Image: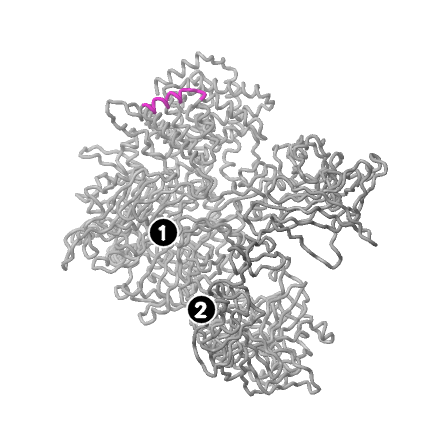
């Protein structure tokens, strides 16, 4: 099977799977589900392909985007033991047994296309698998697997890993960062807690940097490994540092482990070889109520939306962390969660501040005692300034920050354990997804840094915890959520489920969703057309939807045409040329006119015949009134509009009682909306206009009766009536119709009218008739209707038909029925009394007790006990003497019983406590019937011991607490103070305590009422306690001060009054606009004074305390038991000022000094703020320094002054807790507000000795003035000296800067004068290494894909054809059907989930499938282009077509052009393109290139310009080629690194060889041959590398003192020279290297210390080549070699001109070649351009720039720009970053030249644009001429084109 056939099959499978997947998508949150075969642990998603990788127990899986399994690999179980090494034999009798492999690490290495998998077996070993096929393992050379223990080795220990830049070269390579919890075991000492591991061949998973004493790792000391357990939660990389979030014990000491755990974040610098930069700080998440959420559960680095970033001060990157807090609630552990957000800029700032605190002496210890055993002190006297580039200190490594990073939760979850977090954005909004341990996914809308809410909860896997790994798909449309057993694909939004605007925009509060107004649907913003117009898309933040505010008129009668005015809120502004129409029901739309001045429309009502289908049985019908958009054809707002019809009423009362304007015509018997019609149609008509004039039934005044009709018994019915009409001649009389519910026909009988004497009323008498009904129910309702003249209705009423047989199904119920039914028990059934043939019975069977209440009572009796059961009695006389309780007689209450089911009796006197059952004996005419209860009743003796308090107000309301024994017995418990009732709270009563509320006492002349005893009654029992209770006068309020408070309240108010001690717990509140504040509890000092904290400002929906900025007045009230007068002081005490003024809250600002630490020199302490004294005095503010008070002496609006204690307090806060800085914390309390100001550090100052004249002056009274004058002079002198020193320092810097500028300008001028004509002889123009056709196609069609499935060998099948083969053949036939293929492509593109990548893949697969049918592919392409053009011309900017790859056809066009232009590119245009690439490469490498940053001296890109003056010398080295005696000359620079020199030598040696078959840079070493037999292998980094202050410089040729004409050789790389030698071998190598360096000129005094320092300081350093980044460690060094020199970057821009002038010829040659319409240009270009011109004419496009833009987008943009940027698509070459940046500038210039728009450039334009600004007009002219020349070429016929395409197909 050839490649084309395999491609077609791949495309067929892809299309079928896509269609099947989309057709199976349900309308639910979870779209796909995968249930694993084993417990799942980790998940990761390939951001390139979208594939999902799962790691579980003994399994790893590879799934596609729809969670279908592609591959799975079994990783266990294997024979292993934690007590055995990775390889080799076990010791101490340990035995390897079958052990499960728990996945610990699952990370994608994109650079190598590998999946890194680490499990728990074999001490945490790791493997690598191919990313495209995990069944293929990547094995190191000569090894089967790695032997490095990496991860945790058991099921529970945590391991966190990620890949990020790291040593030895962060700019070029990535390493694997691993953090793992410690586990016990003999072999775990080899596994550090945190390390960076190499991913390079030969060092796979080994520590990235290793030395004798240091390495790139953190190891917990042996003495703490068993007690100091660190659990790692997350890891990530950010701006040059790698971070880890971890939970660890708060204390290091064993005896303090009960202090719990805290959360910390640690980081390591990318360049740090030895982890000297390792630093920790604490993360604190503290709720507003003070709840500390100390344990992190999950964390993620996320980029926020615009709104959230603005609330963080435009900080977009945040660390989102889930914290939990565990506490006991009602005896069970409750876990509460909180989501806290930390801006990464704040994280960086806190790291800087903590490091700075160590260097400036604020902190004396570096901490980290669990990993740092020696030298824990901070540098003394260091003035080093720390910035974000600080990468550790070799002399003072490792640091534990003392100052925590604290924040408040953005959202908390009560009794919910949140386990995972993922964050994304939609528009300006930020959305978080959190998983819980109960298997639910919460969707959270984070509005700001302090405001978030949950808007949806999705059940994912109820009952199973959601694991931390959650990932979005490539489009962030779905979220992959994993539990221990399954993976779910959850859609992030379900906007389509919301059907109304209220549900979508207001109710759902989903930031993804908004109401698309004119489309009347809920959608995302991107799916709503013209969403940016006013009110076209109503977002989740809206408070109102589009709706009618008023309809005038709201209803009209049927048949009347009218105009209706519609007033609409949020009516969208229609697009130009469109309007609105009104639609009444199904009637034809009516055009609407827009109202002036108000948002609304004016519509005409439609003809009634169009609405007839809506008419119903009622007197009106309502139709939906829609407003339809003429732009979208959608009805987007509606309301019910009513048309009423009076004529449907057939009786007078319904007509008069209708809500419409109806009148009744009596003799015409009709209802009309036009009163004039009655007299007009029927002269002499009686018009009824009021309901009281209607003929109707009436009830006799003061009477109410119901009509009961026994079924089957003849009965007559009489009804009192009024306003009965007198039938006229020819009218029939009256009739009665009884219609039983459910019966088809009424029962009819005649009626006659009886006139009432002396009354206008009449009686209607229905003839005696037996009425019946069929259903077996007790009663049934029937309608009695009286009519006259056959159809004229008088009135109707309800009557009741009943059956005694149903009313009394048993004897008891029958005998107890009401007499009105006249039912009796006879013949074994219940019958109507007059129908009984036998004598009725009057007794029934034996009773039964089911329950009773209460269960206890006093021994005196009197308890009313309710007994429930069946057949207990028919009448109380049946059991009046037959009921007893616990053997004592119980008196039946005759008035309180339910026949047969319930009886109440009162207990008698028992004399003592006793227990027994309840017995009921029912007597009848035959024999007594007895029943006994199962439960026991208890007689108990209650006792009262004490009551408190003994005083209360006269109005009552005092809560008396009563204690004693058996206080809750009996049914009725009452309490009295003498004869004053005290209401008992029965619900809270227990056997030993009862609470009662006192009632009001009578007033007395003395104002005091005293009771002598407290009495409680328990039914008939009474107990008394002799205690006096005093009723005092009600408390009064006489004065309140002060009457100003801040909004948050808490200012202490002094309240004066009378009798205040009578209130146990007085409370104060305030009211504002009928809104009541929270109540605050007051403290009573004495009878007349109490202190009350001011209540907070009452809030309402319109006001919030945080937003009010003006003074607001509210009224104060008090709650004092039942004293109502103090609730409303302004009413009862008009002379008392009770209005309190609320002012804005004070704001006390933290100390501005470094790290919030203020230096105190013994004077007063000043604290700055705002609004400090608006509602505060000095006594209202309490300032604490540590646990000591600071005496407040002054309080101004912006300053508070207090005097601390003379000696420095202990380093604690006000609660005695030790602070992180060991300094006392300054805290300000004002009311309910608390402000943490910072830390106070005392400075001991020598006492100032005043001169004698000053003492005399003080004695004379002027001492104070002199002291102030001296202080001012001292400050002035100090400032003057400081300013002078600063001026001198700036002057020196300016002189240095001027010298540097002068030197740079001279050098730039010299470069511009250099002759640039010799470059061509340095370029080799022969042997251009073109890629073969297959490689060319794969790179263009599938960029970035290395191992595409179509390149794999086909699976061999049996000779017999399978169903699969048949299906594929048939599908191939369908693909060759033009109609089917076009429908397939359109169907795929219409799918919502059909992404851009999917379109690219389909387009490429289609072109591969038809690569040998180019004529058919061209026809398909033309058809698709026509459809695309048709869609584009209707848009506002049709010239944008083909600008981006947004459809299948656009990618097909790119691929089609690539196939058609291949021969032209290879034979004609390839040469100038390759010459341009070589010219740029030669020019860039001619000068210094920074190996770390890729910045170059010669470049076209300002971003890659080397902004430093770098001295260098050109060296000529002679390369020895094998055993030959011939030498090859190679030019290098003495500033080149060893690797750069090797690259230049390889380029010279293999100048005609394709890059793919050349030796790799890492396969050879560069050997310098010096003297006789002296060989030295040169390396980028070795023992002699220059280093210091945390930096190591990459070795240059200058470092080795390589001279001009040196002899070099490329030799195969030796393993022993790369870290694998033995100790002896290593020492010999060191010695030989030392001797050789000494022979080359290195002094012994220099070489020896270098080697010693390297041994001690190896690893942990950052590397640099030419330009060392700014290092704050050198600030204190005034050496001339430091990096404090300032440069103006613009002075180096002239180097861009030098580079441009050098390669200008090659740029011009390339542009001239590709923009020439010569004979070698493929005819496909002419064919395509003519096709585009024809389509523009066909669509009547008058603007010539549109067709020109289409041509530019199709050829220059989609073809040439692609190859300019990516010459490796055509040639087998290697493109460096420095060369790539220059190619991008040329590509941009080519794009600007082909653009039809004008490019206005100024002095602020980018340098890359200005560089070719003068050349672009020339290039534009070339482009225009190119298009004109093509237009003048002869047209290409279809036959010519088909012939050409056939040739292309043959080549393909």
Whether residue 1590 sits left or right of residue 1069 in the image: it is left
Whether residue 563 sits left or right of residue 217 in the image: it is right
Q: Which residues are magenta?
A: 1366-1379
Residue in the foreground of this view, choosing between 398 and 1079: 1079
- The quarter holding residue 361 reads bottom left
Whether residue 367 sits left or right of residue 900 in the image: it is left
Whether residue 786 sits left or right of residue 1755 in the image: it is right
The colouring scheme, among rainbow, by chain, secondary structure or one colour, is one colour
Q: Is residue 1705 magenta?
A: no
Residue under pointer 2: 931
Residue under pointer 1: 270
Residue 259 horizontal/vertical position (percent): 37, 69
Task: In the rendered view, tell whether residue 1557 sits above or below residue 1084.
Answer: above
Residue under the point 62% across and 42% down: 535
Q: Is residue 1376 magenta?
A: yes
Could you tell me if residue 818 is visible in this image? Answer: yes
Residue in the foreground of this view, choosing between 1125 and 1277: 1125
Task: In the rendered view, tell whether residue 1770 sits above or below residue 420.
Answer: above
Mark 1, other Cα within 10 Å: few <14 / some 14–19 / many ≥20 = many
Residue 645 horizontal/vertical position (percent): 73, 38
- The reply to whether discs 1 and 2 touch (Cβ–Cβ < 8 Å) is no
Residue in the foreground of this view, choosing between 433 and 1721: 433
Q: Quadrant of the C terminus?
A: top left
């Amino acid at each position: 099977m050839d490649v084309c056939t395999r491609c077609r099959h791949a495309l067929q499978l892809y299309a079928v799977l896509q269609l099947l997947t989309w057709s199976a998508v349900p309308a639910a949150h979870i779209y796909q589900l995968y249930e694993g075969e084993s417990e799942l642990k980790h998940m990761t998603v390939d951001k390139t392909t979208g594939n999902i990788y799962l790691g579980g127990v003994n399994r790893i899986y590879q799934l596609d985007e729809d969670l279908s399994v592609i591959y799975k690999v079994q990783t266990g179980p294997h024979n292993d033991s934690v007590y055995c090494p990775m390889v080799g034999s076990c010791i101490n009798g340990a035995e390897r047994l079958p052990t499960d492999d728990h996945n610990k690490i699952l990370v994608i290495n994109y650079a190598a296309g590998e999946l890194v998998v680490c499990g728990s077996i074999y001490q945490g070993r790791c493997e690598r698998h191919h990313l495209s096929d995990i069944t293929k393992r990547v094995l190191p050379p000569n090894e089967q697997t790695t032997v490095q223990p990496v991860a945790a080795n058991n099921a529970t220990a945590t391991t966190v890993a990620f890949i990020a830049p790291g040593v030895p070269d962060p700019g070029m390579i990535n390493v694997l960062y691993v953090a793992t919890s410690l586990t016990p075991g003999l072999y775990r000492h080899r596994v550090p807690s945190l390390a960076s591991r190499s991913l390079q061949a030969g060092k796979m998973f080994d520590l990235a940097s290793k030395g004798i004493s240091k390495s790139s790792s953190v190891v917990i000391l042996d003495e703490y490994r068993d007690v100091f357990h660190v659990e790692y939660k997350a890891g990530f990389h950010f701006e040059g540092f790698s971070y880890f979030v971890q939970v660890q014990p708060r204390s290091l000491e064993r005896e303090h482990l009960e202090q719990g755990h805290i959360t910390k974040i640690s980081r390591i610098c990318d360049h740090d070889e030895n982890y000297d930069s390792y630093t920790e700080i604490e993360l604190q998440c503290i709720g507003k109520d003070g709840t500390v959420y100390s344990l992190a559960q999950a964390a993620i680095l996320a980029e926020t939306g615009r709104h959230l970033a603005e609330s963080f001060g435009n900080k977009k990157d945040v660390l989102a962390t889930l914290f939990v807090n565990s506490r006991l609630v009602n005896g069970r552990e409750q876990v509460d969660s909180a989501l806290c957000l930390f801006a990464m800029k704040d994280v960086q700032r806190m790291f800087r501040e903590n490091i700075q605190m160590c260097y400036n002496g604020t902190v004396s210890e570096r901490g980290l005692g669990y990993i740092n055993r020696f030298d824990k002190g901070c540098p003394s006297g260091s003035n080093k300034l720390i910035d974000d580039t600080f990468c550790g200190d070799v002399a003072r490594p490792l640091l534990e920050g003392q100052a925590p990073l604290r924040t408040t939760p953005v959202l908390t979850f009560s009794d919910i354990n949140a386990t995972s977090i993922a964050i994304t954005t939609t528009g300006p909004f930020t959305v978080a997804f959190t998983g819980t341990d109960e298997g639910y996914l919460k969707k959270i809308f984070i509005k700001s840094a302090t405001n978030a809410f949950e808007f949806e909860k999705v059940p994912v896997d109820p009952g199973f915890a959601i694991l931390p790994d959650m990932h979005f798909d490539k489009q962030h449309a779905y979220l992959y959520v994993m539990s221990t057993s399954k993976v779910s694909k959850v859609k992030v939004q379900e906007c389509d489920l919301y059907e109304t605007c209220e549900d979508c925009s207001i109710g759902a509060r989903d930031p993804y969703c908004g109401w698309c107004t004119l489309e009347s649907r809920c959608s995302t913003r991107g799916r709503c057309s013209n969403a940016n117009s006013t009110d076209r898309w109503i977002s989740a933040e809206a408070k109102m939807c589009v709706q009618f505010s008023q309809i005038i008129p709201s209803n009209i009668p049927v048949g009347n045409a009218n105009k209706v005015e519609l007033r609409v809120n949020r009516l969208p502004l229609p697009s130009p040329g469109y309007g609105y129409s009104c639609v009444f029901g199904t009637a034809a739309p009516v055009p609407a006119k827009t109202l002036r001045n108000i948002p609304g429309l004016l519509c005409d009502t439609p003809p009634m015949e169009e609405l007839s289908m809506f008419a119903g049985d009622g007197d009106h019908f309502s139709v939906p009134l829609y407003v339809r958009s003429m732009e979208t054809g959608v009805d987007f707002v509606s309301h019910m509009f009513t048309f009423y019809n009076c004529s449907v009423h057939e009786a007078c009362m319904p007509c008069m009682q209708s809500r419409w304007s109806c009148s009744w015509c009596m003799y015409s018997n009709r209802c009309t909306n036009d009163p004039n019609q009655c007299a007009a149609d029927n002269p002499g008509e009686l018009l009824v206009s009021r309901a009281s004039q209607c003929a109707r039934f009436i009830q006799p005044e003061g009477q109410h009766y119901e009509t009961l009709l026994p079924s089957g018994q003849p009965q007559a019915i009489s009804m009192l009536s009024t306003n009965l009409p007198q039938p006229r001649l020819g009218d029939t009389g009256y009739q009665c119709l009884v219609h039983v519910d459910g019966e088809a026909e009424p029962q009819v009988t005649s009626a006659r009218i009886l006139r009432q004497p002396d009354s206008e009323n009449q009686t209607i008498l229905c003839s005696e008739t037996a009425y019946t009904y069929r259903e077996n129910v007790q009663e049934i309702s029937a309608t009695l209707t009286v009519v006259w003249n056959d159809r004229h209705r008088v009135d109707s009423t309800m009557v009741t038909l009943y059956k005694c047989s149903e009313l009394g199904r048993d004897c008891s119920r029958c005998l107890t029925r009401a007499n009105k039914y006249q039912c009796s028990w006879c013949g074994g059934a219940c019958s109507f009394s007059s129908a009984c043939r036998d004598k009725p019975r009057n007794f029934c069977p034996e009773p039964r007790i089911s329950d009773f209440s209460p269960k206890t009572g006093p021994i005196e009796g009197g308890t009313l006990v309710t007994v429930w059961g069946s057949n207990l009695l028919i009448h109380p006389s049946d059991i009046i003497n037959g009921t007893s309780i616990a053997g004592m007689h119980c008196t039946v209450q005759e008035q309180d019983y339910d026949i047969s089911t319930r009886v109440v009796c009162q207990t008698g006197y028992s004399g003592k406590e006793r227990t027994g059952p309840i017995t009921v004996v029912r007597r009848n005419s035959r024999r007594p019937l007895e029943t006994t209860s199962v439960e026991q009743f208890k007689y108990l003796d209650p006792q009262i011991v004490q009551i408190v308090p003994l005083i209360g107000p006269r109005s009552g309301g005092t809560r008396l607490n009563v204690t004693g024994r058996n206080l809750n017995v009996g049914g009725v418990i009452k309490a009295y103070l003498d004869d004053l009732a005290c209401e008992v709270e029965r619900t809270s009563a227990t056997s030993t305590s009862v609470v009662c509320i006192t009632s009001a006492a009578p007033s007395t002349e003395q104002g005091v009422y005293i009771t002598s005893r407290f009495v409680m009654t328990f039914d008939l029992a009474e107990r008394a306690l002799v205690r006096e209770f005093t009723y005092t006068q009600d408390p009064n309020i006489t004065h309140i001060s002060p009457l100003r408070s801040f909004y948050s309240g808490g200012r202490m108010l002094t309240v004066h009054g009378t009798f205040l001690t009578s209130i146990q717990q007085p409370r104060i509140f305030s009211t504002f606009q009928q809104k009541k504040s929270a109540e605050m509890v007051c403290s009573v000092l004495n009878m007349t004074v109490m202190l009350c904290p001011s209540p907070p400002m009452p809030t309402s929906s319109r006001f919030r305390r945080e937003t009010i900025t003006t003074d607001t007045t509210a009224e104060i009230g008090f709650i004092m038991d039942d004293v109502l007068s103090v609730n409303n002081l302004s009413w009862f005490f008009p002379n008392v000022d009770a209005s309190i003024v609320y002012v804005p809250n004070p704001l006390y600002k933290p100390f501005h000094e470094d790290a919030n630490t203020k230096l105190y020199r013994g004077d007063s302490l000043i604290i700055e703020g705002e609004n400090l004294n608006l509602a505060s005095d000095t006594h209202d503010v309490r300032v604490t320094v540590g646990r000591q008070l600071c005496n407040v002496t002054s309080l101004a609006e912006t300053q508070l002054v207090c005097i601390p204690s003379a000696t420095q307090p202990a380093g604690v806060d006000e609660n005695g807790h030790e602070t992180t800085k060991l300094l006392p914390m300054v805290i300000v309390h004002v009311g309910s507000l608390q402000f943490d100001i910072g830390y106070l550090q005392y400075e001991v100052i020598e006492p100032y000795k005043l001169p004698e004249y000053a003492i005399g002056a003080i004695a004379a009274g002027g001492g104070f003035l002199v002291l102030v004058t001296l202080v001012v002079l001292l400050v002035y002198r100090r400032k003057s000296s400081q300013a002078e020193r600063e001026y001198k320092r700036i002057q020196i810097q300016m002189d240095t800067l001027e010298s540097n500028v002068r030197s740079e300008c001279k050098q730039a001028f010299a470069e511009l004068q250099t002759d640039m004509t010799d470059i061509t002889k340095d370029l080799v123009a022969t042997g251009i290494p073109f890629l073969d056709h297959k490689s060319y196609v794969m790179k263009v069609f599938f960029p970035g894909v290395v191992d595409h499935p179509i390149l794999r060998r086909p699976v061999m099948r049996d000779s017999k054809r399978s169903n699969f083969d048949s299906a594929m053949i048939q599908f191939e036939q369908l693909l060759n059907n033009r109609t089917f293929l076009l429908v397939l492509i359109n169907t795929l593109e219409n799918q919502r989930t059909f992404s851009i990548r999917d379109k690219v893949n389909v387009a490429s697969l289609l072109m591969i499938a038809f690569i040998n049918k180019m004529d058919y592919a061209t026809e398909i392409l033309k058809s698709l282009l026509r459809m695309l053009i048709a869609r584009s011309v209707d848009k506002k900017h049709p010239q944008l077509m083909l600008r981006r790859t947004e459809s299948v056809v656009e990618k097909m066009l790119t691929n089609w052009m690539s196939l058609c232009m291949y021969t032209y590119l290879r034979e004609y245009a390839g040469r100038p393109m390759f010459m341009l690439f070589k010219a740029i490469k030669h020019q860039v490498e001619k000068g210094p290139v920074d190996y770390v940053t890729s910045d170059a001296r010669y470049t076209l890109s300002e971003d890659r310009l080397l902004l430093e003056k770098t001295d260098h010398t050109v060296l000529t080295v002679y390369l020895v080629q094998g055993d030959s005696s011939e030498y090859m000359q190679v030019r290098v620079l003495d500033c080149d690194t060893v690797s750069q020199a090797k690259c230049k030598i390889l380029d010279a040696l293999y100048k005609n060889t394709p890059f793919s078959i050349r030796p790799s840079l890492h396969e050879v070493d560069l050997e310098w041959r010096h003297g006789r037999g002296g060989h030295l292998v040169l390396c980028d980094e070795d023992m002699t590398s220059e280093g210091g202050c945390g930096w190591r410089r990459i070795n240059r040729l200058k470092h080795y003192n390589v001279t001009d004409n040196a002899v070099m050789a490329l030799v195969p790389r030796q393993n022993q020279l790369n870290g694998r030698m033995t100790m002896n071998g290593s020492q010999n190598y060191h010695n030989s290297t030392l001797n050789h360096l000494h022979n080359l000129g290195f002094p012994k005094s220099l070489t020896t210390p270098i080697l010693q320092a390297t041994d001690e300081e190896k690893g942990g350093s950052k590397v640099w080549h030419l330009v060392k980044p700014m290092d704050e460690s050198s600030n204190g060094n005034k050496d001339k070699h430091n990096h404090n020199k300032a440069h103006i970057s613009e002075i180096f821009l002239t180097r861009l001109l030098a580079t441009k002038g050098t390669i200008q010829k090659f740029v011009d040659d390339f542009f001239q070649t590709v923009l020439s319409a010569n004979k070698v240009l493929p005819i496909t270009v002419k064919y395509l351009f003519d096709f585009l011109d024809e389509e523009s004419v066909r669509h009547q496009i008058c603007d010539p720039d549109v067709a020109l833009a289409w041509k530019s987008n199709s050829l220059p943009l989609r073809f040439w720009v692609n190859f300019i940027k990516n010459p490796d698509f055509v040639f087998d070459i290697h493109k460096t970053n420095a060369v790539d940046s220059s190619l991008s500038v040329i590509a941009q210039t080519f794009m600007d030249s082909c653009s039809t728009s004008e490019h206005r450039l100024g002095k602020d334009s980018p340098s890359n644009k200005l560089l070719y600004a003068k050349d672009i007009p020339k290039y534009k002219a070339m482009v225009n001429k190119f298009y004109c020349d093509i237009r003048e070429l002869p047209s290409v016929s279809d036959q010519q084109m088909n012939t050409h395409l056939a040739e292309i197909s043959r080549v393909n």
